[in-house]
Amino acid sequence: MTLTGTKWRSLAVLVALSASAFNCASPTGGGGGAGGGTATGSGGSVASGSGGDTATGSGGVTAAGGNAGNPGNPGSGGANVTGIGGTTGIAGTTGRGGTTGAAGTIGSGGTTGSGGTTGSGGTTGGGGSSASCAGTLMRCSGSCVDTTGSQNNCGACGKVCRSDQSCWQSACICPTGQGDCGGVCKDIMSSTANCGTCGNACATGATCVTGACQCPTGQTACSGACTNMNTDGKNCGKCGTVCGSGTSCLFGACLDPTSLACTPSAKANTSSTKDASITLGKYWINNNQWGASTGSGTQSIWSTCQQGDLIGWGTSWNWTGTSNKVKSYASSVLGWQYGWKLTNTGLPLQISSGSKLNCGWSFNITQSGGAADVSYDIFAHTVAMAGTNDTPTDEIMIWLYTAGGAAPVGTKQTTVTIDSASWDLYRGSTTWNVFSYVRTSNATSAVINIMDFMNDLVSRGWMQSSKYVSTVQSGTEIFTGTGELDTTGYYCRVQ
C-alpha cells in the first residue's frame, strides 16, 4: 500500500521526532554536532548534510554526523518542520562521529545549520575541563607531583635540587650538619673554615666542636690566634695588653718576676670556720684545723691582695692543749688536696721532667707563747693525677721559720746546702715517708726551687724520680700559743 499526501508527511514528522528524542540522525538534511540543535533546511535542491566535528570534551557523547541525502524535491531541511515544496528527500546513512573525548563534561551543542544547497552541520562542541590533582599535589608535565619533597619539582614545577641537596618542605636543603657555602654543601659542625656558618673561620690553634670554635683549655682567641693570657706578654690578662720592659706576664698580670711586693688592701673574706676556703687565682687559702681535737682554740683566715699569681693573705690563732701536737695548718694550696679544687695550677710535675718549681714568700709573724713553724708542705704520688682516695707516698716539708721549740717528725740525718741556704735534714714516717728540711737560721723572705729539694732526695736514693709533685702548700703549723702570720707576697711558678 502506497502512502501519499498528508499521511506520508505525518509519518515523516513522527520519525523525525523519534530520532531527535534518541539523539539519532535526522532522515532529512545534515546531521547536527554532538548535543547540537537540528538543522532546518529551506526548500530547494537536495541537501547534503555535513557531519559535525567530533566533540572534544571529557565525558562528551559521540557526535553522529549524516551522509549526503539522496536527490529529491525541495523539502524542509531540519527536523520537526515539514518541508515546503516537493517530496521529502530520503536521508543518507548515519555517519560515525569522532571518538569519545577525555573524561569531562558533555560538550555544548553546535549552532543550527543553514538550509538550501549543502546543509552545514553544527559547530564542534566545546571540550570538557582538564582533570585536577588531589589534595596539595601540583600538575607538573602532565603528572601530579608532591612539590614539598620532589627532587625535580621542589616548591614549584621545574625547580631541581642539586645532587648534594634534598627537597624538604618545598626547599632544597643540605644534609644535617652541612651548610650551603657558595653553591656547595660543606661541613659546618667541625670545619675550622666554616664553623657554625659558612665563612666563619676559627682562630689558629682552635678546633670546631659542634659548630663552635674552641681554643685549647686555658687559651683564648686573640687577633686570630689562640693564646694563654696568663703567660702571653702581648696579651696579658686580656687581648692586647702588652707587658713593659722588666716585667713578665704572670698569671694574667704584668709583674716584676723578682718582686714579692703584692700591693695590700684591707682584710677581706675573713672566716674562722674550720676548713673554710678563699680562692685567689690558682691558689686557695685553707683554714685547715686537722689537729684541733688535741686542744681547743680558734683560727681565722683572710685575704689582702691578688695580682696575677702574686697573692697576699693572713691567719691568726689562739690555741691551747697538748704542746707537741699540731692543732692547725692554715695555708695556701696549689694543686692537690685529696682532690683538685682548681685547675691550671701547673701541677702535677714529675721529678724527672727537669722543670723548675720556683716559689717566693715574704711574710711577717708575731707570736706569744707556744710553738709554731712557717713552712712549705709538699706531697708526692706515684700517679700523675692523684684522686680523692690516693694516699701520697712521701711528704716533704721545708721550714723557713721555727719558734718555741717546734720540731719535725723523725731524726736529723745531715745538714745540706740548697739554694744558698743551710738546712738540717730530718727523716721519719707517719702513714708515709716524711722528709723535713729545717733552715738553720730563720728567714721571713726567701725564693727557692722546690725541685732542688726533690732532686736531693733522689740523689740519696730516698725517692724515685718517676714520682710526681702533686701539691705545694705554704702556711703555719700551730702547736699552741697566740699569734698572727701576714703574707705580704707569695708565688709559686712552674718554669
Image (cartoon, rainbow, N blue to C red):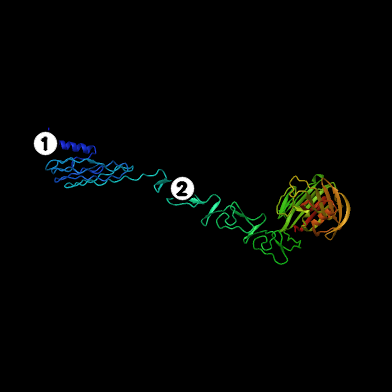
Q: Where is residue 248 shown, x and y percent of the image?
A: 72, 63
Residue 337: image location, x then y, percent: 75, 49
Residue at 83% of width from left, 48% of height from top? 433
Give SS at disc 1: loop
Callout 2: helix, strand or loop? loop
Name the residue beneath numbered marker 1.
4
Q: Is residue 486 left or right of residue 198?
A: right
Q: Which mark is residue 320?
A: none
Most extreme residue toward the top, as rendered?
Answer: 1
Coordinates of residue 78 in the picture (x, y in percent): 18, 42
Q: Is residue 24 above or below residue 475?
A: above
Give the number of the mark in front: 2 or 1: 1
Q: Looking at the picture, which amino acid does disc 2 mark?
A: Ser
- Which label belongs to residue 150? 2
Can residue 266 be seen from the camera position used here? no
Q: Earlier in the sequence, mark 2 or mark 1?
A: 1
Q: Amino acid at mark 1?
A: Thr
Q: Is residue 283 left or right of residue 131?
A: right
Q: Is residue 425 left or right of residue 491?
A: right
- Residue 13: x and y, percent? 16, 37
